[in-house]
Image (spheres, coloured by chain):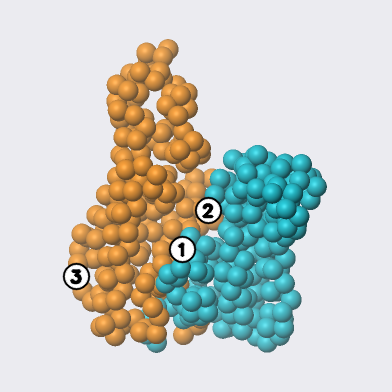
Chain colours: A orange, B cyan
Amino acid sequence: MTMAKRDTYTPETLLAVAVEVFNQRGYDGTSMEHLSRAAGISKSSIYHHVRGKEELLERAVGRALDRLFAILDEPGARRGRAVERLEHVVHRTADVLMAELPYVTLLLRVRGNTRTERWALERRREFDHQVSELLRAAVDEGDLRADVDVRLATRLLFGMINSIVEWYRPDAGAPAAGAEVSDTVVRLAFDGLRTS
Amino acid sequence: MTMAKRDTYTPETLLAVAVEVFNQRGYDGTSMEHLSRAAGISKSSIYHHVRGKEELLERAVGRALDRLFAILDEPGARRGRAVERLEHVVHRTADVLMAELPYVTLLLRVRGNTRTERWALERRREFDHQVSELLRAAVDEGDLRADVDVRLATRLLFGMINSIVEWYRPDAGAPAAGAEVSDTVVRLAFDGLRTS
């Protein structure tokens, strides 16, 4: 039974289980014993795939970060006026957050106690910084209002986007489909609630 | 020494220490022993003030909830067009969040494991619901756009406001003063980033 189960595990499926446990218990609160029980395989079977829980964390947040940084290389993020590139990035960031929900959730909860966590925080800051620069460029081009502080606006913008992880569930009873959520984020961020 | 310290404690100052510990360790992860150490008084001295840690939680989130609900009774929230009342509530919610930072932070982290936590979640939902109704009324009066789902817009709006607890620090090196933060939240929420 254990053997049969172990055989079905790939690094990918083991990662999915680990991310679920990390999100439930917190990374600090998760032991290899917890991971072994959740996966239904022995600890030594897990060590067959990875060196330990920090490697699982690194792979998990690395996946979220890779998906996020890939947005900045998409054509929509590289061509056109800064405001259009920013709109593309905001829309796609919300998309990626929902498509990679458990991975991005874990990334957003990272606090910086280990080397991997500090690396993840550093990469997040770099992503935020690049978006912030895009916002600044759009202000300079006259398409975004100059009467808001760019850093503050970036923080609030990410606050709105990142809050999606608190309530969005792709399955059962999602209050809005993913595409509607991303569209609404872009609409609110750029044009606000008021009728124009 | 211990006696002297105990004498200086009031239910109010004990509450402030408890909230700090709850926010650091999480409510579940906090024992009376942790509270006793942080306050520098014996457990029995704490029991002199409160029945236990759940009462401290109840008082702490109760304080945050009282301040938030009081906003809905302010003249600015009761008179005028719905859009103006909503603007007032959004601005003041951000104000209260920053003025009562540790208390609101604790409220936002409550997950619902105990009776008190479930009560707090219920009250939060009620507050969100009242804001959502105000948003709906402003749409009906034609002042807010009808092409966004009211529930979704309310979630994103609170996502933006509540995210302030993640980075706002009233002391050392706050990137923006409280008033500027509240003003920017209102500006972004109602008019968006784009130049009009």
Secondary structure at badge 1 equals loop
Residues B163 and B142: in front is: B163
Q: Determine crowd level at label 3: few under 14, some 14-19, many 20+ residues with C-alpha closer than 10 A.
A: few
User: Which is more foreground, mark 2 or mark 1?
Assistant: 1
Residue B66 placement (x, y as % from top left)? 72, 65
Q: Which quadrant does the C terminus of chain B fall into? A: bottom left
Q: What distance separates the C-alpha of mark 2 from that of mark 1? A: 21 Å
Residue B76 placement (x, y as % from top left)? 68, 83
* Identity of the residue furthest to the front in this view: B1
Q: What distance separates the C-alpha of mark 3 from that of mark 1? A: 32 Å
Secondary structure at badge 2 equals helix
Residues B171 and A19: in front is: B171
Please name the amino acid that badge 3 sits on.
Arg
Q: What distance separates the C-alpha of mark 2 from that of mark 3? A: 33 Å
Asked if residue A160 is positioned above or below residue A48 in the image, the reply reads below
Asked if residue B175 is positioned above or below residue A141 in the image, the reply reads above
User: Which is more foreground, mark 3 or mark 1?
Assistant: 1
Q: Determine crowd level at label 2: few under 14, some 14-19, many 20+ residues with C-alpha closer than 10 A.
A: few
Residue B114 visible within the image: no
Please name the amino acid that badge 2 sits on.
Trp
The residue at which mark 2 appears reads as A167
Residue drawn at x 56%, y 69% as measured from the top left: B98
Residue A79, numbered circle: 3
The residue at which mark 1 appears reads as B167
Residue B14 placement (x, y as % from top left)? 70, 54
Chain containing mark 3: A
Residues A195 and B86: in front is: B86
